[in-house]
Amino acid sequence: MNHKNLDVWKKSISLIKKVYLLTKSLPDSEKFGLTNQMKRAAVSISSNIAEGAARESDKEFIQFLYYSLGSSAELETQLIITQELGFLAIPNDVNEELQITMRKILGLIRYLKSKKK
């Protein structure tokens, strides 16, 4: 399966762009803190989708999709922390993009699991 053809991968790339733009607004003091962590989590989402799609079995792909889901939860937490610390208000489109990405990951997991039955 080519990851570049997956809607979930495309959505995760769009999310990365939004996160990178958003982190430009964080204070310089967070360059090696939240800024770095948020970028890494966002990149990890699409990277794990791509790596899983390149694997030979659906079982392995599902495992990498779960890693991707974990990175999504990390990013969600970091966005909440950023807002709670008063660094910036998280735009609705970023939260929405993240929620859509998470739903698409879960949908792909369900689809791959249903193929086994």
Image (spheres, grey):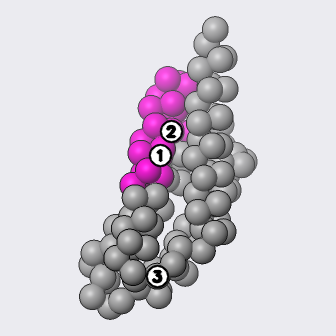
Query: Which element is circle 1 on?
Result: helix
Say how many tags the image has. Answer: 3
Image: 109 above or below 45:
above
User: Which mark identifies residue 34?
Assistant: none
Identify the residue under disc 1: 68
Q: Are marks 2 and 1 in contact (CB under 8 Å)?
A: yes
Identify the amino acid type marked 1: Ser
- Position of the N terminus by quadrant: top right
Q: How far across and down, in percent of the image, does residue 104 sit?
A: 65, 43
Q: Residue at x 59, y 41 (%)?
A: 105
Q: Pick whichever, 78 or 47, lies toward us.
A: 78
Q: How far across and down, in percent of the image, does residue 6 sit?
A: 69, 46
Identify the amino acid type marked 3: Leu
Query: Which element is circle 3 on?
Result: loop
User: Which mark identifies residue 65?
Assistant: 2
Q: Main secondary structure of the magenta part?
A: helix
Identify the residue under disc 3: 88
Q: Are marks 3 and 2 in contact (CB under 8 Å)?
A: no
Left or right of residue 97: residue 88: left
Magenta range? 53-74
